[in-house]
Amino acid sequence: MATDPTQQQQLALILGPDLTHLESLISNLMSSTNDQRSYAESLFNLSKQTHPDPLFLNLANLLRSLNPETRTISAILLRRHLTRHHDDSTSSSFIYPHLSLSTRASIKSLLLSSLHSEPIKSITKKLCDTVSELAASILADNDWPELLPLLFQYVTSDDNRLQESSLLILAQLAHYLSETLIPYLPTLHDVFLRCLTGSSSDVRIAALAASINFVQCLSSSSDRDRFQDLLPLMMQTLTEALNSGQEATAQEALELLIELAGTEPRFLRRQIMDVVGSMLQIAEAESLEEGTRHLAIEFVVTLAEARERAPGMVRKLPQFVKRLFGVSMNLLLDVEDDPAWHSAETEDEDAGETSNYVFGEECLDRLSIALGGNTILPVASEVLQTFLAAPEWQKHHAALIALAQIAEGSSKMMIKNLEQVLSMILSSFHNAHPRVRWAAINAIGQLSTDLGPDLQVKYHHSVLPALAGAVDDFQNPRVQAHAASAMLNFTENCTPDILTPYLDGLVSKLLVLLQNGKQMVQEAALTALASIADSSQEQFQKYYDAVIPFLKAILMNANDKSNRMLRAKAMECISLVGMAVGKEKFKDDAKQVMEVLMSLHQSQLESDDPTASYMLQAWARLCKCLGQDFLPYMGFVMPRLLQSAQLKPDVTITSADSDAEFDEDDDSIETITLGDKRIGIKTSVLEEKATACNMLCCYADELKEGFFPWIDQVAFTLVPLLKFYFHEEVRKAAVSAMPQLLSSAKLAVEKGNSQGRDESYIKQLSDYIIPNLVEALHKEPEVEICSSMLDTLNECIQVSGTHLDEKQVRSIVDEIKQVITASSSRKHERAERAKEEDFDAEERELLTEENEQEEELFDQVGDCLGTLVKTFRASFLPFFDEFSSYLTPLLGKGSTSEERRIAICVFDDVAEHCREAALKYYDSYLPFILEACNDEYPDVRQAAVYGVGVCAEFGGSVFKTLVGEALSRLDAVIRHPNALHSENVMAYDNAVSALGKICQFHRNSINATQVVPAWLGCLPLKGDLIEAKVVHDQLCSMVERSDRELIGPNNQYLPKIVAVFAEILCAGNNLATEQTAGRMINLLRQLQQTLPPSTLASTWSSLQPQQQLALQSILSS
């Protein structure tokens, strides 16, 4: 209650019968003076808390005020305070239920009477918003029974204004109450039918919005189909508006239809030819406004993009795709040869590019991604050839820009036609017009990214000389700079052996640009040099002494504000050159560079100075180069780095339907819509934050235990960022850092560098990181990041080990089950999509790629389960039992090969690490495992035969009954005609290993005189180097104990044993451990001394000459 007598007095006036007091209060709520507005807000909130009934009743009465502004504000305040905000689940913010019944009745009555009498359209719309939001909150409880009959009465009246109002309300109610309104669908259909053919364009647009909203909100396709016959009338609303010159109305209609195309494309399918045909007619009509034509194009592009709901539908309309591509190409022709483009000081200057041109670029990019190369490329190549044959420079320019725009979506098809694509581009490097040459270079840059590394491997001999020639164009700095930038794109995907032959020429040309070019050219030359150094690695040492003085000179002398980016790029280049040439070559200069960076850091850099973010990355590279020698600088680097990692996002939140618009063209602000909120985020802050988080991860990884002093600060900074949904890169960096922090702590404790902290510190850190990671995994929306989180969780479990308690293991297990369930449901949705009538080969390819992401996810699930089994052994089995209902179905034929492999691997881990405790699972799992030994997929066979070996070793009598079947299954793998082909050799080696385990642990159950020599005949193993070492150690042990069946009667198999030893020893450390090799050499020496000379001679003669020489050398050393 208010205690201030003045406030009491004012409250009494506001809540009293004279409405002028409340009118002046709400006017002050909109005041631009902070004090006045704040005081009005506190008074309003106090009234709301203490006397809501008279306040809202008076507010509703102000809807009759003569002042339009008062009526507007009253409608807004009633909506804001009376209705339930659908993103706010707290009932306390919903004031309506706390009002008395009589107040509620009066407010509803006043709202409806105002709606009936309000003459101003903008206020009517605000009233409609208030009525529909209140109705959405209370209609389901039958709290406003008179509303729907009244709306139906209005909508059938002759008053266009009332018809429009009721349609606006019904349109909004569809979102909240589509199920409640299902009984009224026949009535609604008739209402919409009548209104779509009405005389008023406002009513027709309102009917269009309402029909579309209902189609979007109805969950049953049969309910949606009731509205199918309205589609021609919906389109007629658009064409009538255009025919009568009402383009603003037409644009409203187009925006509504675009929404329908994005959310319910299937609704359009039956009349798709007519609908898309009409849209393309609008797009091609040059007499219409640019905005109208753009919206018509947007409709068709949106329809093409709606592949989750209507896969492949637009691809079935090749003639339309061709027309749409042509329209987009014509937009690219709207470009002017503006002198400002040529004289620009920065690469970003886009003078001459119109809004048509920019929209055309965007459409081509989106179309190629949506439709894929099989559809776009045949259409494109025909159009582009025509454009390139034309005399106008604009057409050449458009063709090259188009190639760059469609490359990402058409990359697979372009790679198949690379020669043709490249010849189109490279021939334009000599075009007379600088903007065409620029566009050709731009296309090479884009293709280097989208088609790499195929482009680099096959066509370096054409592309690199062309780019090297283009950097000589001193008459056109824009072209020069862009050629250097394209060099960066091209060389990023190059290996040292591709680059080495070109290094002399490229480095010398870039050094010329550093000395003579305009600043924009120098900046581009620096980034190209940096990339060339990074890709050529130690091959760059040859140029180090020539390059580094130039780079240091720029770093030390480019101090003007205008040179800030130049200095920043020099910093980047030096750090990449240092990493390429290595610590020994770089260390003397590194000290000097660090001193410059430290002095720059201490100077007050302005907030928009790029030096700061470049410096963060340069420090991390210098750390990678110098390793532990970087530790003395850490105290200096870390405070700034943590400050950047802790930056708060610069966020502006408005209501999604508010009139406040973000500047659509402002690249520094990214907007996302969440529910009914629109969020604008300053991207530069997010990028600096992401860079800093990545750098922290680098330091922890590089410095290992040396990073210990900063672990706590970094953990408290990064763990909350596991759920930073504004920026994926921040989340990814935070995820990657978690195991690094735990490893750093563990190493520091083990090596005594932990400032007196012991094992309990690792437990404490693990208790902070792992539960937060599990919670973040639960909330993560991106499948790719879920995979990374599981990979990270797996690494964290490996480091933390038994520091995890049962509760934490339980939460991990529950989350893994949740991940499997979510993945299955996504795959099920895709399977449903595959049943759509328009589903085609292109869609199947995209679907396969999406399912491959799920397999990657499941692979991580298998790894996590395997690590938990290895860590907790038999005590994990009660948890493992919970997974049987998830894993057993995956062993059957309905699963993918990868799912079978992973399910088998998990069982292999259980059998190997839980031993006797795992015997109870053999009956259910072993039949699947034995069958999978002959699976068509080599990876599945490898996992299965490995499992047979594990069960042979630990299965005892339980496995004994299956020895016969196991032998025949392994025999089929070993004797397969292609067993030693590269794709099968891992399965072969593991089968041989399993056969060896059967020989060792089940000798009494086999015909040893046949099986053991057969096993010996398969040696040595050379594919699976881990298994090879195990098997060759077993062979050694058997020879040491003179295994009868292995040596054979009369030493029959000794020559083979010696030959196997010889081959293993000649292979260095690859096929046997040092210890095993030592034992083999001792055995050979013993044989030399104990065997009869004749036997020794025949054994020796069976070896190849080079093996004899190698053995003599080994035995004599």
Image (spheres, grey):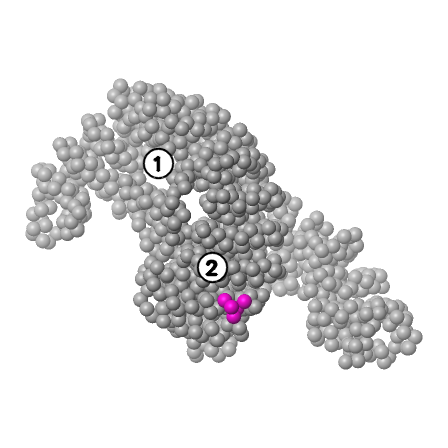
Q: Are marks 2 and 1 in contact (CB under 8 Å)?
A: no
Q: Residue at position x 78%, y 64% from top?
A: 1019
Up/down of 174 relative to 455, above or below:
above
Up/down of 1046 relative to 474, above or below:
below
Nearer the camera: disc 2 or disc 1: 2
User: Disc 2 and disc 1: Cα gap in Å?
Assistant: 63 Å
Residue situated in front as seen by the camera: 87 or 645: 645
Residue 118 falls within the magenta-colored stretch: no
Q: Quadrant of the C terminus?
A: bottom right
- Is 369 on the left-hand or right-hand side of 716? right
Query: Can see residue 774?
Result: no
Q: Amino acid at mark 2?
A: Leu
Q: Amino acid at mark 1?
A: Tyr
Residue 546 falls within the magenta-colored stretch: yes
Q: Residue at position x 62%, y 47% from top?
A: 896
Residue situated in front as seen by the camera: 356 or 239: 356
Q: Which residues are magenta?
A: 543-547
Residue situated in front as seen by the camera: 484 or 43: 484
- Image coordinates for residue 633, horizontal then vertical, percent: 42, 74
Q: Residue at position x 53%, y 38% from top?
A: 388
- Image coordinates for residue 136, horizontal then vertical, percent: 31, 36
- Is 561 on the left-hand or right-hand side of 942? left
Query: Can see residue 463?
Result: yes
**SS label for mark 2:** helix
**SS label for mark 1:** helix
Q: Image quadrant of residue 1107?
A: bottom right
Residue indicated by mark 2: 513
What is the crowding at mark 1: few (fewer than 14 residues within 10 Å), some, or many (at least 20)?
Answer: some
Q: Image quadrant of residue 200?
A: top left
Please identify the dominant SS of the magenta region.
helix
Residue indicated by mark 1: 176
